[in-house]
Amino acid sequence: MTLSTGRRASARPRTPLIALVAAVVALLAPGVAHAEAPSNDDLGSATPVTALPFATTLDTAESTVDDDDPTSCYGYTRNTVWFDYTAERDGMVRFVASGTGFSPLISAYTGVRGDLDLVAGSCSYDSGTPRTFQVTAGTSYHLLVGAFYYGGPVSVRVEAARPAPNDDFASAQALTGPPAVVEGELGPTSVEPGEPVASCDRSADRSAWYTYTSPTTRSVALVATAFRQPSVAVYRGSALGGLSEVDCVPSRYTTAVFTAVAGETYRIRVAEEAASAGWFELRMTTASPLRPDPWFSPARPSVYDDVEVFPSSGDPLGRDLVGGEVRFGDGTSAAITGERVRHRYAADGTYTVEVTGTTSDGRTGTGSAELVVETHDVAVSAFTVPASAKVDQTGRLTVSVVNTRYAETVRVDLFKVVDGQPRQIGQLTQAVPARAGGKVDFPFAYTYGPADVGAVVFRAVAVIPDRYQDARPADNQATGTTTVRAKLAGVR
Amino acid sequence: MLPSLRRGAFARARTAAVVAVAALAAVLPAGVAHADALPNDDFDGSAVVTALPFTAHQDTSRATKAPDDPSWCQYYDAEGSVWFSYTPTEDVILRATTAGSDHPTILSAYSGLRGSLRGASRACDTGQPSTGASVTFRATAGTTYHLMVAGYDVAGGDLSFGLTTVAAAPNDRFADAEAVTGLPATRTPDLSTAWYEQDEPDSGCTDQAGPSVWYSFTPTTTTSAVVGLDHSNVTATVYTGDTIAGLTQVACTTSRWDPLVFLATAGTTYRIRVAGWPDLSDTVGVSLTEAPRLDPYVDVWPSDPTIYEEVGFTADMWDPFREPVVSGEWDFGDGTTAPVREQGPTYHHFAADGVYQVGVTVVTRDGRVGTTTRAVTVESHDVAITKFTVPSSAKAGQSKPVTVRLANTRYRESATVDLYVDNGQSRTLVGTTTLDVPARETGKVDVPFSYTFTAADALMGKVAFRAVVRLPYPVRDARPADNEVIALATTVKPGTTAMKSA
């Protein structure tokens, strides 16, 4: 191996260790100049790792890429150098490379040149170094150190890895809190025989375990943060074979949440695929309370609308309500079942709609919102048009509008229907007081022309311009017809 | 530092390192400097600290930097590094310092394994020339912490290194909250010696679990209390309740620019938590004061109200806490009152002219009360055109009278009447008269004008007169609808006859 210790260090030998390094370099690779590629540039001349722990530094700036360098970890690995390690016993190996001024890329392979298989969990492309992976006694491993863009001084270490202390279910780490923040490593872990398959993460093959027992019944939230996305699963049960899943979330963007019953011990599994397994942080907090926040469609219904109530959970953790009740504020209520909740109010008014809801994790909360039911409903009660007229005669057309609930400003649009198409001929806006039995007349005039001879059809439409829609648009229109005669000859 | 390279030695590395460290630990406290032997230059030769307090003096001028020295704290200006390590047997707060060193240092602490060391929360300091670098961090029992001391722009020098435990802040725990009596009060807790505890409550202002200290406050009289901060990345939260697991939030703030204010009721104990973000390691200033009294003022719109309109009243004030008004009352000075609205003006109609003392009392959510009174003058100036006399027909060249009759009942006014004529092609100001109009219940004032019809008027055949009466600024006529009139058009004929007779 070329034990170049880095250009700077080589240029400034200061300690006795440097002298030692120089001696080793001289012994192992006599005559190698700094500008040349390292001796382990090629897989065929890989530096042997004969015992663990192993550590070295070298400069990969001049190392090159071989045509048959593997691409299964990363397609464009540059400045590759190789180490060979044959495992003496089954276990886990921690492989780490640290570069000065660049991020090394590492991976490990079994097999022979031209037919190399990437060792699961050994590729640092996903999560950076170190990588920890399983080795089998007697198997040879080809360890690759490369770079994304360029090489340089790099420190390489290969060590026997101790499993994470909470790798096994039986040695789970106890959490106290909330709040609690603990750090963990999924690299030196494995999935043990009999370990459950998490419903939200079926492919994980690295896992660490925690336990949590609360003295009081409380709602707890858990989120694991890492470079990639470990899953978090919560179980009830005391033995690996007898666990029942309480909650399972697949990524750091969602939070596991469950109700910890006083005195009951929960088992928490943080898991990941080998390729992404690494350091993570597990945070336990008191789960946010629910603040149900119902909303309505339409937002301002009338007594003629079926208003749909959406019983939003208002949960910062994003869980939906799975049960509970909507109280409409008029003495009636409906259960929350997942089906649509609809209600028709009998009278106008401001109603406080209350939602008491429960999420699947057992949290319950109550919230309310005000719903204004307002029925704005004007109607055209009469449309008077001349029954007959002669050309050049001016006729009077009257639209009568009735209104009983609220004082409205009403606009009446008057159309003449020509070839089936309405053509506006008048518009009048008036205030219409709310009066039972009263009406407001909207007068228009129309002078019949030669084109009207035969019959002319008028249409009157009453609208409330301030409102999106009248509660009952069906009674807002009327049509009338005048029979029109031509002028008698000689009449001027 | 330099890598250890003897391959054969690695199998025995752990043992060798322990031996070396034991030797160093024995040597360093005695203050002996060994310039040539620098075993803790390398991470694997880290000086193991076995007992605290620990101090060491060491010549680190030959320290070197390793490719795998962690870059978490400050990598590029670190020229050389030496390592110390310590494994506490119980959860403690550790403080490391390089005070007394003759060179600038970068001090940081890590846990984990070589090649993947993780910085301990809050444990990175690039130091001050006068005081050296210092880090204070929470250490967990059984975890080994690796302290890296690097020279800042130098390899090293005459290093003084100290490591000791520090006591937690006396009010670190809820149960040990410091009772604050008497306002104003100012405290400067050192959050580097604080941490969170079991059941520490949520704050509506942060979702971070960070270091916190506790205060309690039990006012003897009901007051509006303010909690202010002098630091960013700090949250102050006020709760009520007697156990840490049974607290109810009253108010919170996370901004030094936005102090929190709350209604502190006599006899109730309020729990104030001052918490930093997880990586905060500073002394922060926190104050508890009484809120300044509210000083509202009354906005009136329009500012010159009359009896012919709804007058809008708004109680405005500059409130540094931006607390909403939740109740209050208007007294309009005419025997009527109305509740203060939370938003928007309250409208009132005055039935008669006069000067009214309009008073308002407002109460903010945090219980502060403010009151003020303002005199509002209601004056309804109202002149009216009650008659407009114009000729029904005229001939070009003929002069005919036009009369504008004014009525006025309340105040003697100086009124100006403008008369215009419009023949469809041009609009002409015929005349302007300004005269006093006495206030009389039934009296009238006729304002006379005269107009000579033109040939152009005759060509068009019709002209229309328009009269407008106005009052001098700033007097505003309360009912402008009766201040303008347009007459039916006057028929104008060619004026040959008239010209002859003239």
Image (cartoon, coloured by chain):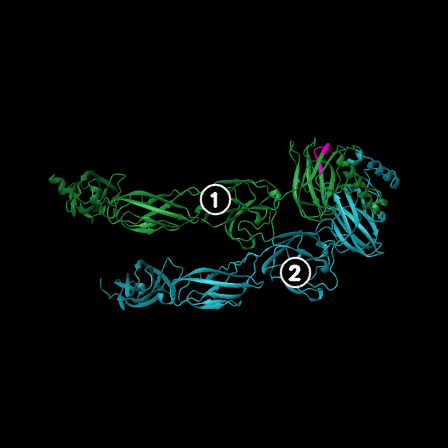
Chain colours: A cyan, B green
- Circle 1: element type: strand
Camera-side residue of B479 and A411: B479
Say left or right for A248 vs B367.
right
Task: Bin the neighbour count of mark 1 within 10 Å (Cα to Cα): few under 14, some 14-19, many 20 and up.
Answer: many
Marks 2 and 1, Cα distance to the nearest angstrom? 44 Å
Determine whether A196 is above or below B403 in the image. Answer: below
Residue drawn 78% across and 38% down? B26
Vertical side of A320 occupied by B261: above or below: above
Q: Position of residue B178 (x, y in %)?
A: 54, 45
B122 or A227, nearer to the observer? B122
Is disc 2 in contact with disc 1, using a CB cutoff of under 8 Å?
Answer: no
Residue B403: which quarter of the image? top left
Q: Quadrant of residue A429?
A: bottom left
Residue A391 included in the magenta stretch of the image: no
Taking B168 as reference, is A467 left or right?
left
Instruction: Quadrant for the C terminus of chain B, please.
Output: top left
Please indicate, yes or no, whether residue B125 appears anywhere in the rendered image. no
- Say which element carries label 2: strand
Q: Which chain does the numbered disc 2 sit on?
A: A
Say which quadrant the N terminus of chain B sits in. Answer: top right
| Of residues B74 and A492, the one drawn nearer to the viewer in this rendering | B74
Residue type highlighted by circle 1: Val
Numbered circles on residues, count: 2
- The residue pinned by badge 2 equals A233
Q: Which residues are magenta?
A: B149-159
Expressed as whole percent of the image width and height from the top left, the position of residue B151 reads 71, 34
Which residue has dot 1 on it?
B226
A159 relative to A253 in the view: left or right: right
Query: x, y percentage for residue B177?
Result: 55, 47
Q: Nearer the viewer, mark 2 or mark 1?
A: 1
Say few, some or many: other residues with alpha carbon within 10 Å of mark 2 (under 14 / 14 to 19 / 20 or more). many
